[in-house]
């Protein structure tokens, strides 16, 4: 990992008797995408709110772009952007008007506002819709515009708090492409998500959080290897199933299938299966990812 641009140590936060964060440590390298993965209520949004100066921790320290989030919040805010779970754009303005308004509020030089807005509209594939009012935009277009607005000041660090919540699969894929472009432009990204595929697709590293604690960290491949190896899953015509370990290579799989044939086993189907992030999630949290997704909206408004 490159030199960290986001560093948190021992972050703690509680609401009354409910502990939301219980000693969270976090490092995000410059130019890196870190996915903060966990079920609803795990502490993801609270972590982002603290790092973006919207919430004060009860304990611990955090630095973003070299600035202390408590002692120098102004410097932190100047270095970051935050895109929340819902698009925060004015539906009565056009896409172009939204960008120019926010550019003026961000004190961009007047000579730069027009060119910067045009560049972002092109990057986010919104040029053709630039002069349409936002209330006519699809959900995916609104999310792209929201992200475009957050990049007006060329932030060093981009916080994306479940940016694809509620989007259809096509819009989600489109937004993933945009996020990749943002990273290619040199930004550091901290992404919170409940979607395992999203973490797998975008993240250089993944930190898994549950009940306010970091319970695992590594690349997607590291985490998958930590819960087991590949195996050949064989379903017999009787309905029984066997799982036979393999290194995943063609010669080894061929050897296993030849052995099954020699034994005269009546096979209905077979497949080579490697561990997935679903397996990681189930092993680490004790519940499958779809159970986590079913919790969306079930927690209180103060944490997600």
Image (cartoon, grey):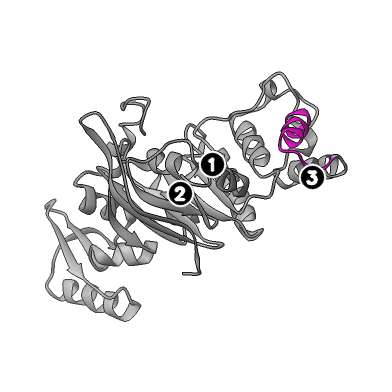
Which residues, given as a range, are shown in magenta? 96-109
Instruction: Tell me the number on the disc at residue 198.
Output: 2
- In the picture, measured across the screen, residue 165 lies left or right of residue 255, that is right
Q: How crowded is mark 2: few (under 14 residues within 10 Å), some or many (20 or more)?
A: some
State the image coordinates of residue 268 (x, y, percent, origin top left).
Answer: 22, 56
- In the picture, measured across the screen, residue 74 lies left or right of residue 259, that is right
Q: Is mark 3 on a helix, strand or loop?
A: helix
Determine if residue 144 is in view: yes
Q: How crowded is mark 3: few (under 14 residues within 10 Å), some or many (20 or more)?
A: some
**Real-space Cα distance between discs 2 and 1?**
9 Å
**Real-space Cα distance between discs 2 and 3?**
28 Å
CB atoms of marks 2 and 1 within 8 Å: yes
Residue located at (24% from left, 73% from top): 246
Residue located at (18% from left, 72% from top): 261
Residue located at (39% from left, 64% from top): 219
State the image coordinates of residue 146 (x, y, percent, origin top left).
Answer: 63, 35
- In the picture, measured across the screen, residue 278 lies left or right of residue 3, that is left
User: Marks 2 and 3: which is nearer the front?
Assistant: 3
Residue indicated by mark 3? 116
Q: What element carries label 2?
A: helix
Magenta-drawn stretch contains 90: no
Magenta-drawn stretch contains 107: yes
Residue indicated by mark 1? 172
Residue located at (79% from left, 35% from top): 128
Determine if residue 194 is in view: no
Mark nearer the N terminus (1 vs 3): 3
- Depth check: give the residue in front, 107 or 282: 107
The part of the image, by quadrant, that contains residue 244 is bottom left
């Amino acid at each position: 990992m490159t030199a960290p641009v986001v560093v948190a140590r021992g972050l703690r936060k509680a609401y009354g008797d409910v502990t939301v964060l219980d000693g969270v440590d976090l490092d995000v390298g410059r130019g890196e995408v870190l996915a903060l993965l966990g079920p609803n209520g795990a502490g993801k949004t609270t972590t982002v709110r603290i790092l973006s100066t919207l919430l004060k921790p009860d304990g611990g320290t955090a630095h973003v772009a070299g600035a202390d989030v408590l002692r120098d919040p102004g410097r932190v805010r100047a270095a970051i952007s935050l895109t929340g779970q819902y698009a925060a754009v004015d539906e009565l303005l056009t896409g172009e008007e939204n960008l120019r308004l926010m550019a003026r509020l961000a004190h961009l030089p007047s000579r730069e506002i027009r060119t910067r807005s045009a560049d972002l509209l092109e990057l986010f594939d919104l040029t053709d819709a630039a002069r349409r009012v936002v209330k006519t935009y699809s959900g995916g277009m609104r999310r792209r515009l929201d992200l475009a607005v957050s990049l007006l000041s060329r932030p060093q660090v981009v916080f994306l708090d479940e940016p694809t919540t509620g989007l259809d699969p096509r819009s989600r894929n489109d937004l993933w492409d945009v996020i990749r472009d943002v990273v290619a432009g040199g930004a550091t990204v901290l992404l919170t998500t409940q979607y395992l595929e999203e973490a797998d697709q975008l993240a250089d590293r993944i930190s898994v959080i549950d009940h306010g604690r970091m319970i695992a960290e590594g690349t997607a491949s590291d985490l998958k290897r930590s819960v087991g190896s590949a195996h050949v899953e064989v379903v017999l015509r009787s309905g029984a199933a066997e799982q036979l370990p393999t290194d995943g290579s063609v010669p080894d799989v061929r050897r296993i299938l030849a052995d099954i044939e020699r034994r005269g086993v009546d096979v209905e189907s077979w497949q080579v299966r490697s561990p997935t992030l679903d397996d990681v999630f189930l092993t680490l949290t004790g519940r499958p990812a779809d159970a986590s997704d079913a919790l969306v909206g079930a927690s209180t408004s103060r944490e997600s």
